[in-house]
Amino acid sequence: GQNIDQPTEMTATEGAIVQINCTYQTSGFNGLFWYQQHAGEAPTFLSYNVLDGLEEKGRFSSFLSRSKGYSYLLLKELQMKDSASYLCALMDSNYQLIWGAGTKLIIKP
Amino acid sequence: DVKVTQSSRYLVKRTGEKVFLECVQDMDHENMFWYRQDPGLGLRLIYFSYDVKMKEKGDIPEGYSVSREKKERFSLILESASTNQTSMYLCASSFLDRASSYEQYFGPGTRLTVT
């Protein structure tokens, strides 16, 4: 079967760095996505990793280790507007997304 | 910009009513999806469609049906609404077969309350 785990909630300080982890178990893998979802709004795409390594995109970076079934999203220079839920999603062998429950990130001044 | 629109942001229906949720996308995407999102749970796939008149069951299709008569439009139907269908419903679309763009684009969601 497939399983995705990510922390339920994290708190960080404005200007700091935070790392949100996602671990998964799957028999088929076609990539891992990170989405951001502000309260009451639709999820929006942040990143897609299919090969091992770090992908950097401005203040946000995403890392993947396929052998360890592990990914993380790194947010630098945190801003208040980064307060949101961050969703990890695994693309399985049928190209369907399996979603984690999301990590609610709270940014404090 | 990709745009996915949903017919209602908020909807209140009574138990037993038939409910239609409409979704329209303007990017000529082949794939369209209906999810529900509940607190503490990940997005759960109800149905998806990869072409006009084609539909596939997702993880939780019971109590729902779908219709895709035109490429840009995907409807979710609750034949007889029940209180356990109170949820946020999200529609999404994506290209079918682009190696670098399996990204799904989401609509704003419909918060359905069944009383």
Image (tube, coloured by chain):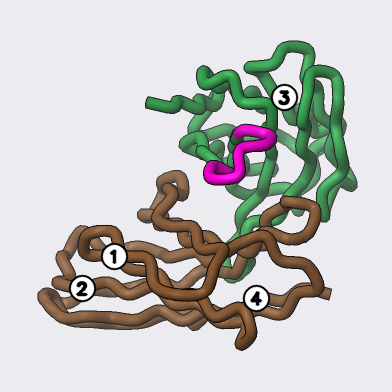
Tell me the distance, in whole angstroms, between the alpha carbons under discs 3 and 2. Answer: 40 Å
Which of discs 3 and 2 lies nearer the camera? The answer is 2
Tell me the distance, in whole angstroms, between the alpha carbons under discs 4 and 3. Answer: 29 Å
Considering only order in the chain, which callout, 2 or 1, is on the residue closer to the N terminus?
1
Q: Which chain is displayed in green in the rendered image?
A: B
Tell me the distance, in whole angstroms, between the alpha carbons under discs 4 and 2. Answer: 24 Å
- Chain A colour is brown
Q: Which residue lies at the image location 59% right of the left edge and 41% below the top edge?
A: B90
Which contiguous range is marked in magenta? Answer: B95-102
Question: Label 3: which residue?
Answer: B75
Question: Label 1: which residue?
Answer: A60
Amino acid residing under circle 2 = Lys
Q: Chain of mark 3?
A: B
Magenta part, dominant SS: loop
Q: Are marks 1 and 3 in contact (CB under 8 Å)?
A: no
Tell me the distance, in whole angstroms, between the alpha carbons under discs 4 and 1. Answer: 21 Å
